[in-house]
């Protein structure tokens, strides 16, 4: 069964450092997402990406965050200057489509745990 | 606005007994609803989805959920719990035309042998 793969599974970084989280979505999917889950809290939407541009983003996704699809397979989330409160599990997801004919179904990766010290 | 409320943060059942995980939603439009499961150190796995077709939805591993518009509920059930069902369960709502998913706070299911 096709999977969304994420690397690294766990990253520890110092406050102020830049972090890049990588994701390989399912190959024929068109929509890509990042979500995060702070320990003990709910899963929160960060951003969705389609056709090489951001289609939606939440209030959380401020100027320190950016996403990129540098090639045909990878989808990355960059945090420019990490803060303590960025410590969370970050989930990448992809879906084949969206639209009124039926909701898209997200396939999630296993997550990348980011710890900011 | 869309939101999801999972009424129980933790549910504990004995192996072989029924499971009920409750979810209520709020949506201005016709929603699509999902249940995802998260096992320890694993990603979020889709259990089942409702997208305006049959109101009783069957999913994987013997789980099912019923969409009740009058009660704005989408409770997850299973007739007989198995030890492997122990996990975190998330109820999720989205619009059919949107691509933003709204998660509930999750329900942790413990299965007692």
Image (tube, coloured by chain):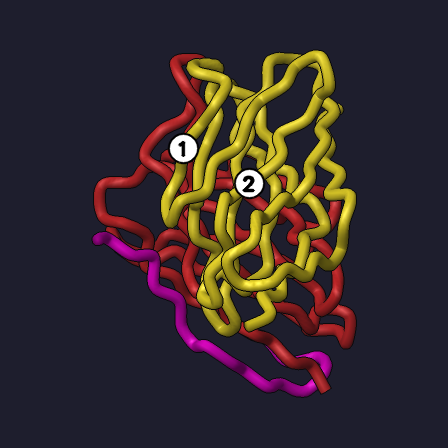
Residue A3: name its quadrant: bottom left
Asked if residue B53 can be seen in this view, the reply is yes
Q: Mark 2 and mark 1: span between their CA atoms?
A: 10 Å
A90 over B54 or under it: above or below: below
Say left or right for B47 vs B111: left
Q: Secondary structure at mark 2?
A: strand
- Residue lying at 37% horizontally and 52% vertically, measured from the top left: A69
- Residue with the mark numbered 1: B58
B89 left or right of A64?
left
Which residue occupies 73% across, 59% down?
B10
The image shows a total of numbered marks equal to 2
- The relative height of residue A13 versus residue B80 in the rendered view (above or below) is below
Q: Nearer the viewer, residue A105 or B74?
A: B74
Give residue A44's position: percent from left, percent from top: 66, 50
Foreground: B85 or B23?
A: B85
Task: Determine the residue located farthest toward the front in the rendered image.
Answer: B16
Residue named by callout 2: B77
**Colour assignment, chain A:** red
What chain does badge 2 belong to? B
Q: Is residue A115 left or right of residue A5?
A: right
Residue B4 coordinates in the image, percent (x, y): 72, 35
Q: Which chain is yellow?
A: B
Which mark identifies residue B81?
Answer: none
């Amino acid at each position: 069964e096709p999977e969304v793969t994420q690397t690294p599974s766990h990253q520890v970084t110092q406050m102020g450092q830049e972090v890049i989280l990588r994701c390989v979505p399912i190959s024929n999917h068109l929509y890509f997402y990042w979500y995060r889950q702070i320990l003990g809290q709910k899963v929160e939407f960060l951003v969705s990406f389609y056709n090489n541009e951001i289609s939606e983003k939440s209030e959380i996704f401020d100027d320190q965050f950016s996403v990129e699809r540098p090639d045909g397979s990878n989808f990355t989330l960059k945090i420019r200057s990490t803060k303590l409160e960025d410590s969370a599990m970050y989930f990448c997801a992809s879906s084949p489509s969206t639209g009124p004919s039926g909701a898209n179904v997200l396939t999630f990766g296993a997550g990348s745990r980011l710890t900011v010290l | 606005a869309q939101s999801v409320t999972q009424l129980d943060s933790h549910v504990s059942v004995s192996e072989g007994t029924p499971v009920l995980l409750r979810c209520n939603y709020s949506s201005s439009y016709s929603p699509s609803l999902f249940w995802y499961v998260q096992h320890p150190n694993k990603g979020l796995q889709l259990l089942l989805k409702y997208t305006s077709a049959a109101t009783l939805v069957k999913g994987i591993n013997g789980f099912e959920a019923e969409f009740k518009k009058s009660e704005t509920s989408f409770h997850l059930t299973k007739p007989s719990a198995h030890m492997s069902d122990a996990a975190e369960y998330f109820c999720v709502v989205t619009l059919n035309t949107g691509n933003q998913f709204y998660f509930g706070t999750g329900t942790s299911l413990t299965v007692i042998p």
